[in-house]
Amino acid sequence: MPQPKIKICGLSRPEDVDAVNAARPDYIGFVFAPGSRRRVTPEQAAALRARLDAGIVPVGVFVDAEVDEIAALVAAGTIEAVQLHGREDAAYVRVLRDLLPEGTAVIKAMRLDSLPLGGESGADYILLDHGSGGTGEAFDWRLLDGRCADGCIDGVPFFLAGGVNEGNLEEALALGPYAVDVSSGAETDGVKDAGKISRLVAAVRGSKGRKR
């Protein structure tokens, strides 16, 4: 199967962007969700985006945001993909897509027990997380056994999130996700750690993906 990808989420400082520019993950995330300690304003995100190297896809993370708010950030070039972490359903995704340029990827965060998964979400990718996300905790990955194939679950490419770190990255990759999504696992004392980011990206680049 193709080499897995990696997203480093929750960038909020210029030095965070410098770290990912050096490590070259596939995706990074700017969190716009109210209440998150990693939240950035549109103005902060735009400044960070201007510092980001081309080739790294900036993803905006939202929770039940107004579709116009999301579309404006895409139109401004601040983000190139959208990640939804709230109660957004397929109808919401359809309305949002009408406002986005063709080809803008939509990622829907879901719990594994939030059935049905896959195409009925209306998203291009699903992201499997612990609870509502942002907890830094992993769900029981054993629940994925027998459900993954070629980076997909229920036929849709999936990101594996929730507590992914250097200590369990090999186990996470063995499950065969399209990508791993790392936030707190790339931090020390609550801020992004350039060394951890570099090692995480290097480990993913050296991985051959699914092993079971």
Image (spheres, rainbow, N blue to C red):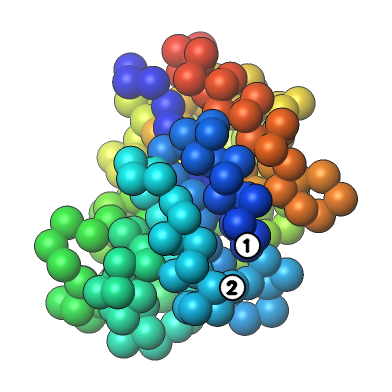
In percent of width and height, residue 174 lies at 54, 20
Q: Amino acid at mark 1?
A: Ser
In percent of width and height, residue 86 lies at 51, 73
Residue 49 shows in this picture = yes
Q: Residue furthest right?
A: 189
Q: Amino acid at mark 2?
A: Val
Residue behind mark 2 = 40
The residue drawn where x is 49% and y is 78% is 43
Q: Secondary structure at mark 1?
A: loop
The residue drawn where x is 31% and y is 59% is 80
Residue behind mark 1 = 12
Above or below: residue 128 compared with residue 31: above
In percent of width and height, residue 121 lies at 33, 62
Crowdedness near tag 1: few (<14), some (14–19) or many (≥20) residues, C-alpha within 10 Å = many
Dividing the picture into quarters, in which one does residue 104 lie?
bottom left
Q: Secondary structure at mark 2?
A: loop
